[in-house]
Amino acid sequence: MNAPVNPETLKSGATRRDLVVGTALVGGALLVGCSPGDLLSIGAKMDFGAFGPFIKIGADGVVTVVSKHIEFGQGNHAGLAAIAAEELDADWSTLKVEQAPAIAKVYANLKMGVQGTGGSSAIANSWTQLRQAGASARAMFVEAASNSWNLPAGEITVKNGVVSHPSGKSATFAELLPAAAKVTPPKTPTLKDPKTFTLIGTDRVRRKDAQAKSDGTARFTQDVHLPNMLTAMVAHAPRFGATVASFDATAAKQVPGVVDVFQIPSGVAVVADNTYAAKLGREALKVTWDETKAEKRGSKELTAAYTGWAAGKGALPEKTVWQGFETKGDFAKAPKGELFEATYDFPFLAHATMEPMNCVAEISAGKAKLTFGSQIPTVDQLNTAKIVGMLPGAVEIETLFAGGSFGRRANFQSDYTSECVQIAKHVGKGRPVKLVWTREDDMTAGYFRPLTHHNVKVVIGADGYPVAWRHRIVTQTLMKGSPIPTKGLDETTVEGAKGSPYLKAIPIVDGQALLPDVGVPVLWWRSVGATHTAFVMEHTIDQLARKAGKDPVAYRLAMYEKAGATRHAAVLKLAVEKAGYDKPATAGWTRGVAVHECFDTVVAQIVEVKLVDGAPKVGRVVTAVDCGVAISPDQIASQMEGGTCYGLSAAMFGQITLNNGAVEQTNFDTYRVLRNSEAPHVETYILPSAEAPSGIGEPGVPVIGPAVANAILAINGKATNSLPIVKA
């Protein structure tokens, strides 16, 4: 991690502070024995109470759990609070949740190394951490009571914030708080046996933000109104990679309410007294764009190029090579058998969050504060520090609720956040500036799930099962611009194909990926690589089962047995049982099945589909999930329902298309999404487990698309080789 110091920087008279900021931004460290978390948190205020950084207890005895993860609709605050509350035996009815400040050293995501929310890791990485925090606080109250009553600690119990002894003595957290706060926290607190849980796994664990979001008191970035605040909008280039050649702000400055117009690295900013004035000012701007380095290829040209490369036709792009992701044996020497071939194409996809991108920044000499829904605070701190010349840890971030993300609010460049900081820095004097992106801005100038092509060849053995599998994936890397050096293959592009139980069951596998450089900004999209790999693997397996004349469930179970995939088999069997798979489907409907693992969670779905005017209509969806300990069954069901609808929306209708490099979709009138009337009935069944919790926010997304495609295959024998299923 040690980064070399540029000699030119030393010659320029840079200060020690500049060097620390600079090396932090490139991922290095000048401080001997200083961890990345230490370095990134230099300048941060670390003043925590007696119970540590995750637990606060007020004088009234009310417990507040501090969440290091943002809440943007997925409901993780409830699950995180329940973990701590269970061990603490707090009163769930009065417990509150508070968003943590941006301090990487204390609040880092243990799976990411920085403070951030993503990869369905919020519950999984906090499980032990919050259990220990809750158990530690509980032990402190028990010891305080033991000392006060002169009774053995082992005889004292805690329930709903009340500490009790069989003798009849009892005290509330509020009454014991002064004494408990003086107790030294245990280094290794005793955790409960999960068999004794009284909160976790019950329907009592419901969202803590539901009331505020229902009555309008929940605070989102768009709700922020500070004294003397300005609002800004940015004019972006119509093609990615284009830059400002010149602009005429004469008409824009004549719009009432417009305060200033100036260029920033990503375009031209219009600053005004209100949002409407900023919008009108931007519309009045005249900008000439330099498109010398702009991406001018369209979706059709990119798809054609990807298809050719995957088929071994045409020269590969410069500095681009095929990289193996799953290889064993020699496909050229595979046993003779029937050859199955298929190609699959997936379009660019928008994240399409309900709340478009926005941020509030206050920048002055020695101060930088951001107020918004920050998904990766550490990255936002780093990029802000780079712009304003501060220590990353000194950049204050107040994280608010956000109206969805699906990956969009977390990118290496902190794109819209950096824009806001650039603008606020120009305005100066600490005057608050709110940057507002319209939906059109995010649809045409944001980040996308990458366009992807798969080419699959399978040699089928005499028993109908594959004996050799050749797989080619062409897509963009999601790690471009990462401050973290990435050696070899970008694993996020192939996850779901790599490690598939089907490939484990096949003797010969030749899986390779090609990651060409395309000038379109791409980003992880809810369920990341599984957004396309799950479809390819599951739809291919159904086609192979059909060729073999075997039931698709039995075919999968046989392959799972060969691969030792016991979790996959268990969830599929649970789905089969709950769907009544051994009985005919509802009259007029046909079933489709799919199973996939992502973020350590396995999901199986059996769907009922019928064709209406040639288009699929999805009715009943039976979902079985193995996600380890189920902290909140209600929230797991909600995530399965939401993920199913999000995935179905993309599979049925979702696509961003480029024409000569320009995005053709601008809003929901042209970017079709699932309507309420089209939402299926989703039933969720959780496989009992004593294992630590795994991801739940994303695993429900990738399974529904192939399940529907497999139902269509069962209806008319036609494979689905490109998405969306419903063509515009």
Image: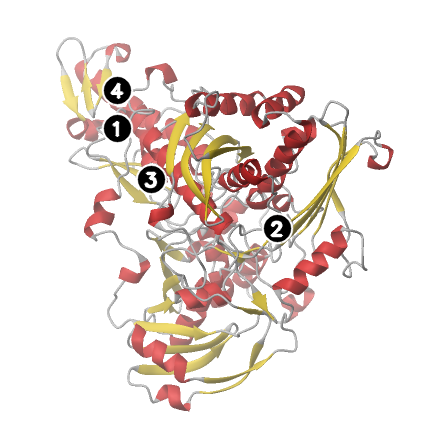
Residue underneath mark 1: 204
Q: Amino acid at mark 1?
A: Arg
Q: Quadrant of residue 25?
A: bottom right
Q: Nearer the viewer, mark 3 or mark 2?
A: 3
| Secondary structure under the numbered disc 3 in the rendered image | helix
Please tell me how crowded label 3 is: few (under 14), some (14-19), or many (20+) other residues with Cα within 10 Å.
Answer: many
Q: CA distance from mark 2 to mark 4?
A: 45 Å
The residue that mark 3 highlights is: 77
Residue 468, quarter of the rendered image:
top right
Label 1: element kind: loop
Mark 1 neighbour class, 10 Å CA radius: few under 14, some 14 to 19, many 20 or more:
some
Say which of 680 and 392 sits in front.
680
Q: Quadrant of residue 367?
A: bottom left
How far is disc 4 from disc 1 in space, using C-alphas?
Answer: 25 Å
Q: Is residue 482 above or below residue 685?
A: below
Separation of residues labelled 3 and 4 (CA atoms): 26 Å
| Residue visible at 48% across and 41% down in the picture | 701
Q: Earlier in the sequence, mark 4 or mark 1?
A: 4
Q: Is residue 401 visible?
A: yes
Instruction: Name the N-terminal-most of marks 2 and 4.
Output: 4
Q: Earlier in the sequence, mark 3 or mark 4?
A: 3
